[in-house]
Structures are given as structure tokens and as C-alpha cells.
């Protein structure tokens, strides 16, 4: 908190001191000096640096470094060129700027230092090289390509836990950072803590630069987790669906689904109070198998600081999507599974040692493998496999059968989108889901009792409208509404490991403004002991393209 107060103080000092310094320099534009952020334009002119440095001030992390550089250079233009002076302007601008503007009015503007024919010290050369490296790396990370790690098995076997990917921002166009004041190379929290690495009191509107194309069906996509606008302040649960845990906590406090149904608002509020006032999560403790699980409350996150997820886009704007007996249908046409798509099977074999061979051959994620014997004492494993894995297994001498598992019973109450007790939504399963329509920009839909559950969160949270229901009527932004026209495109994302993926079937649509980029290739891969029990480097995955 203190660093951001200090930053606010610096921005105020710029507005108070720059008009005077601009006048003394002869640059003019004193009126702009009073306007926060805009005053960086005459600031750059005063220190005779190119206009495009202003763009670097919009780049997270880089902007803080650039401010230090600009502060030092401003001191130089007024003759403050000793090592001591440069340290003061770089480290203590809150003191240096008012001193120069108001107490040292006789100090003349002499302009930037001319290095023609002069040799820089080794320290200065190294310092400038480091600054350049940080700036260049941050710009590349923000606008061109960014490293990303696969943390969960939801995309196996396409992307494995422990894969390190490069994600192209150019594929769909890089987003201008909405929270540009942040620490370099850190996404949303300082390493080893839950302290924000950014300030959210200064933000920019959403804007996307031109890219090579649009998101297409079956593209692997990295995106900001839509339901991540609120988080449980806890290292483990911060990346999980807060709204899902709110409902689960409410049902826990109610003592069950039936009682919760009678007054969901009451129990949701009790759950919020647990999270925010009592700083505890009962359902988290239940999942972890402990008596209590303290958390540090809840926190809102801006869109570009939500957790990054990676899934495959299976539905594009305007599509009608449904899943029937685990088979995906788009616009009533059955979609063939992409190579690498996995489903859960019960595989039976003649010899229990064959279960170990199955793991070694198919690299089955041990966390997803439940092994033992079936009701007849036959060695069996319940694991995720691709269609080609099953065909290969059928050729093994010990193979008996492979039974596909298809969910015909609903998941936990309110688990699946749109997280409603209303029918038919309450009867949907992850293998029998929909139909559902994916909104497209400019599309106008009639609001009905049946589709309100599907689109209310979209209209309120992703399109920034108010919503009120009274007398059986809907009021959007205070106006009676029977129809709604969408402001942006939406997508439907699913993991390739279909039975081990928390995806759009659980939390719904991904807005266009949440799209981050497209994974292009794996630059490093290492097994994760939690999932593979070893830490071996997977040399065969190095520089493998992502499809």
C-alpha cells in the first residue's frame, strides 16, 4: 500500500512542479504540465526524448523504470550532473523536483548532456545496458510474446503439466495494458505473497492492437479467467472460481442443497461474511481435510490481472453448442474430436503389473489414475485416454476391455454453468450439456425467463450494465428491457482432457476482451512430482509446436 501512496504523491508533485520548469526551459506548454499523465508529453520534450517514450509509460513495469530515467534526465537538463545529484533525482524526486522548481529558481536550463567525443564510465555503460534489457524484455512480453507455464492437466495430452510455452500476443492482437502501473515481469502478486504487484486506481480502457487474425474454432487459447474478477486471498484458491466456492460455502452453511434453495441470497451473504469478516473458508477446510482453513478475505482484480487460463476454443460467436453423450455438436453438426482429446475409461487387464506398464507407455497423470480391481476382482484402472491410446491398448495381450465413462448424473449442485437450480440447467452434466447459444457482437436477443440465467452475468459483469428485476420485468441501466444487443464477441472454451477440466461448462463464456494470445511452442518441459512423481526433463517436447 505504501509504495502506491508514494507513487500518487509523485504524480501530484509532477503536476505542481512541471509548469514552472517548462516555463524556465522555454519549452512552453505550461498548461499541460498541470494535467496528470498528459504532462509526460511536454516532460519528454523538455528532456529532448522521442514522443514514443510515452508509449513505454503504458507498459507495465517499464513505466516505473522509465520514470526514474526521465527524472534523472530532467535534473541533467538543469545542470544537476554530479553522481550525488543524479541519485537524488532518481531516488528522491519527491524532494528534488520541488527543490528545483521553487527553491532553486536561479538554476538555468542547459539542456541534455552531449556525449559526442566523450567516453562513458563502465558503471554508466552497464547501467544503460541493464535498463535497455529490462525495457526491451518488458515490451516484448507485453506486446509480442510471453512465457506461460501449464499448471494443471486439463489440456493433456496436448499440453502437459510442466510445459513452458511461448504465447503469441500477435496472433489475435496485443491488448494495451489496462493496469500499466505494475512491477516488471510479475503478473498479479509479488513473488511468495498475495500482495498486489499493480495499482488499480489508474487504469486505461480496453483496446486491442491489430493482430494476425481472430480466434478460430479449435484454436488453443490463453485468456484471463472470466470468473477471476473476485478471488479468495489465498495462494492456492486465488486461481479458483470464487463464485463457485461462494455457492459451496453457502450450501455448507445451510446444511444442504434443499435448505439452501429456500433462501440462497441469505446463505450467500453468510458465505461472504465468512470470507470477508471472519476470514475463514469452511468448504476449503473440508476439501483439504483439516479442521479450519483461514484465508485473508476476498479481493477484486482488474481484467488484465485475472489468472491466465489455457483451453481450446470449441465454440465461436454465433454458434449453437451442445454435448450429447460426451460428443460435441456445433450448429447440430457432430464435431470430430481433435487429436489429443481425452476421455475417462475403465480399462481392465489380466495382470495387475500391466497397470504400471499402462502408466509408463501412455504417461498417465497419476493424479487422474484410480487403480485397483473392479467388482469382480479384475485388475482395472480408471484413467484418461485418447482414442488412439485405446486402439493401441486393444492390441496388448493382457487387455480385456475399455469401458467409456459417460456422466449421466448431474455434478454437484450449481457446479455447471449457468449454476442454476432451474430446469433444464439443473439436469445438465459435463457429458450431456446444452444446447447453449454463444453471443456475437451486435447480436440482439429477446430476454426470456429461460435465457436470463445464461446471459445475466454477461450483461452485468462483462458488458458493465446495471440489472434490476421488479414486477416481473427487467430493467437494464434503469430502462425497461425486453431485448439486449451484445457489445462484444464471446467464446466457449474446453480442455482437451474433457473429464479433468474446469472449463466453460463450469463458468460459462469467455469475452473477447479477455483473450490474451495463442500458445505457439514449448520451449522447455519438466515433469512435475505432484503429477508424474519425478522431475525428469522431457527432451522430446522441447521446441514442439502447439496444435
Image (cartoon, rainbow, N blue to C red):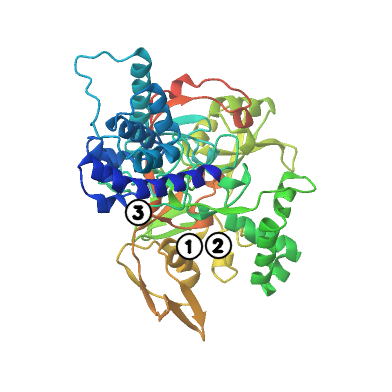
Q: Quadrant of the C terminus?
A: top left
- Mark 3 sits on what residue? 206
Residue 434, label in figure: 1
Q: Is residue 112 above or below residue 217?
A: above
Which label sits in the foreground, 3 or 2?
3
Q: CA distance from mark 3 to mark 1?
A: 31 Å
Between discs 3 and 1, the one toward the N terminus: 3
Q: Is residue 96 above or below residue 202?
A: above
Q: Are marks 3 and 2 in contact (CB under 8 Å)?
A: no
Q: CA distance from mark 2 to mark 1?
A: 7 Å
Tag 3, which secondary structure?
A: loop
Inspect this view and state whether residue 325 appears.
no
Inspect this view and state whether residue 333 appears.
yes
Which label sits in the foreground, 3 or 1?
3
- Mark 2 sits on what residue? 428
Q: CA distance from mark 3 to mark 2?
A: 34 Å
Q: Nearer the viewer, residue 67 or 117?
A: 117
- Left or right: 454 with respect to 530? left
Which residue corresponds to the image point at 68% horizontal and 73% vertical from the top-left?
A: 263
Q: Position of residue 389 (x, y in %)?
A: 50, 34
Which residue corresponds to the image point at 74% horizontal and 50% vertical from the top-left?
A: 286
Tag 2, which secondary structure?
A: loop
Q: Quadrant of the rendered structure where residue 530 is?
A: top right
Q: Position of residue 137 (x, y in %)?
A: 36, 29
Which residue corresponds to the image point at 35% horizontal and 18% vertical from the top-left?
A: 124
Q: Position of residue 251 (x, y in %)?
A: 70, 63
Amino acid at each position: 500500500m505504501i509504495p502506491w501512496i508514494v507513487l500518487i504523491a509523485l504524480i501530484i508533485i509532477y503536476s505542481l512542479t512541471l509548469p514552472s520548469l517548462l516555463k524556465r526551459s522555454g519549452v512552453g506548454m505550461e498548461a499541460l504540465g498541470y494535467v496528470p499523465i498528459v504532462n509526460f508529453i511536454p516532460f519528454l520534450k523538455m528532456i529532448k526524448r522521442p514522443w514514443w517514450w510515452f508509449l513505454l509509460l503504458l507498459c507495465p513495469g517499464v513505466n516505473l523504470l522509465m520514470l526514474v530515467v526521465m527524472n534523472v534526465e530532467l535534473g541533467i537538463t538543469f545542470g544537476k550532473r554530479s553522481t550525488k545529484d543524479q541519485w537524488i533525482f532518481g531516488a528522491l524526486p519527491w524532494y528534488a523536483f520541488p527543490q528545483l522548481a521553487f527553491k532553486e529558481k536561479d538554476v538555468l536550463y542547459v539542456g541534455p548532456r552531449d556525449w559526442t567525443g566523450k567516453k562513458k564510465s563502465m558503471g554508466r555503460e552497464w547501467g544503460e545496458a541493464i535498463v535497455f534489457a529490462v525495457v526491451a524484455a518488458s515490451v516484448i512480453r507485453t506486446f509480442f510474446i510471453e512465457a506461460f507455464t501449464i499448471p494443471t492437466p486439463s489440456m493433456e495430452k496436448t499440453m502437459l503439466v510442466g510445459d513452458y510455452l511461448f504465447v503469441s500476443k500477435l496472433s489475435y492482437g496485443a491488448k494495451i495494458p489496462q493496469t500499466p502501473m505494475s512491477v516488471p515481469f510479475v503478473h498479479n502478486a509479488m513473488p511468495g505473497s498475495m500482495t498486489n504487484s499493480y495499482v488499480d486506481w489508474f487504469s486505461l480502457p480496453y483496446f486491442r492492437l491489430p493482430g494476425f487474425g481472430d480466434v478460430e474454432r479449435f484454436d488453443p487459447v490463453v485468456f484471463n479467467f472470466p470468473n477471476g474478477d473476485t478471488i479468495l486471498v489465498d495462494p492456492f484458491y486465488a486461481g479458483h472460481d470464487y463464485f463457485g466456492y461462494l455457492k459451496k460455502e453457502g450450501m455448507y452453511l445451510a446444511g444442504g442443497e434443499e435448505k439452501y434453495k429456500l433462501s440462497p441470497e441469505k446463505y450467500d451473504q453468510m458465505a461472504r461474511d465468512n470470507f470477508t469478516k471472519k476470514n475463514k473458508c469452511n468448504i476449503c477446510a473440508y476439501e483439504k481435510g483439516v479442521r479450519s482453513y483461514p484465508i485473508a478475505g476476498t479481493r477484486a482484480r482488474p481484467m488484465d490481472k485475472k489468472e491466465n487460463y489455457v483451453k481450446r476454443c470449441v465454440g465461436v460467436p454465433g454458434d449453437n453448442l451442445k454435448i450429447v453423450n460426451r460428443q460435441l455438436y456445433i450448429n447440430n453438426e457432430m464435431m470430430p474430436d481433435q487429436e489429443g482429446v481425452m476421455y475417462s475409461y475403465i480399462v481392465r487387464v489380466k495382470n495387475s503389473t500391466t497397470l504400471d506398464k499402462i502408466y509408463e507407455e501412455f504417461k498417465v497423470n497419476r493424479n487422474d489414475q484410480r487403480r485397483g480391481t473392479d467388482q469382480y476382482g479384475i485388475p482395472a484402472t480408471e484413467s484418461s485416454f485418447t482414442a488412439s491410446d485405446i486402439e493401441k491398448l486393444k492390441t496388448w495381450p493382457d487387455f480385456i476391455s475399455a469401458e467409456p465413462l459417460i456422466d449421466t448424473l448431474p455434478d454437484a449442485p450449481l457446479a455447471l454453468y449457468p449454476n442454476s437450480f432451474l430446469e433444464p440447467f439443473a439436469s445438465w452434466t459435463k457429458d450431456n450439456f446444452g444446447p447453449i447459444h454463444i453471443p456475437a457482437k451486435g447480436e440482439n436477443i429477446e430476454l426470456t425467463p429461460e435465457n436470463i440465467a445464461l446471459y445475466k452475468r454477461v450483461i452485468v459483469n462483462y458488458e458493465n450494465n446495471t440489472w434490476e428485476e421488479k414486477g416481473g420485468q427487467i430493467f437494464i441501466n434503469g430502462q425497461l428491457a425486453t431485448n439486449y444487443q451484445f457489445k462484444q464477441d464471446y467464446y466457449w472454451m474446453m480442455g482437451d482432457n474433457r473429464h479433468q477440466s474446469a472449463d466453460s461448462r463450469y463458468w460459462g463464456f469467455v469475452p473477447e476482451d479477455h483473450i490474451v494470445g495463442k500458445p505457439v511452442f514449448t520451449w522447455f518441459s519438466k515433469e512435475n512430482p505432484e503429477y508424474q512423481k519425478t522431475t525428469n526433463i522431457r527432451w522430446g517436447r522441447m521446441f514442439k509446436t502447439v496444435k
